[in-house]
Image (cartoon, rainbow, N blue to C red):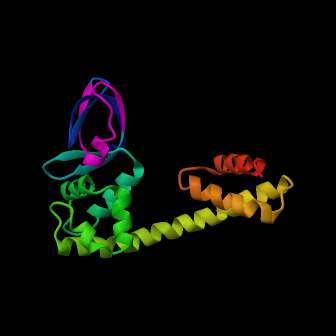
Amino acid sequence: MIAYLKGNMIRKSSNQVVLDIGGVGYCVWIPLSTYLKLGDLNEIVELFIYTHVTDKSLSLYGFSSEDEKEIFLKLISISGIGPKLSLNILSGIEASDLEDAIKRSDVARISLIPGIGKKTALRIAIELQEKLEEKEKMLEVKGSQEKEDLISALMNLGFKRKEVERIVEETMKTFLPDADVEKLLRESLKRMAKI
């Protein structure tokens, strides 16, 4: 299964790109949101790939970020929503905006996406809300452990707990979920130095 491609973009349209990788051209379906983030032709492009295999075809779907790919995978897990409709959904709304609409159960916003009726919008909101809540719980657990590690590390450097809690909280809000503990510690130290 192909999960990632990096290559020279030799063809580009609003829903598809062709990447030349070692003399082989890979045709990749993309949402409009990814298209808008791509550079010019003959530039090196990186895409996170979902490989869809059926009896009749093998298709590659590409995304500019792992978050976008993750929401795509959640969409295709819903009964009746396949890769092409999921791509259409992500072309009609940014992944982060879709997540917000799902969290708020904003069926009206979801049904504004071309090709999505109220019943499908309702199904998306209901089925994905649980999955997004699970993701948030996992991030909270991860975040709380990292927070304690950072506080402990700063206290070992001689800072008092009350001084560091607020700084660590601000740093984590700014840099999670992408940053590792080392980066968070460096940023927290920079902020502590300004106090």
Does the stretch in magenta take in 80? no
Q: How many numbered circles does the render carry?
A: 0
Camera sees residue 161: yes
Is 1 on the left or on the right of 187, as rendered?
Answer: left
Question: Eyeballing the image, is 180 above or below 160?
Answer: above
Q: Position of residue 129 (x, y in %)?
A: 37, 73
Quarter residue 159 falls in: bottom right
Name the residue rendered at 34%, 40% in the picture: 37
Of all residues, the one furthest to the right in this rendering is 158
> What x and y, as percent, mark residue 166?
70, 62
Image position of 2 with respect to 192: above or below: above
**Which residue occupies 22% across, 69% down?**
79
Please state the extent of the stretch shown in magenta in the rendering: 24-46
Q: 130 or 172: which is nearer to us? A: 172
**Residue 191 located left or right of residue 179:** right
Q: Find residue 90 and report its image quarter.
A: bottom left
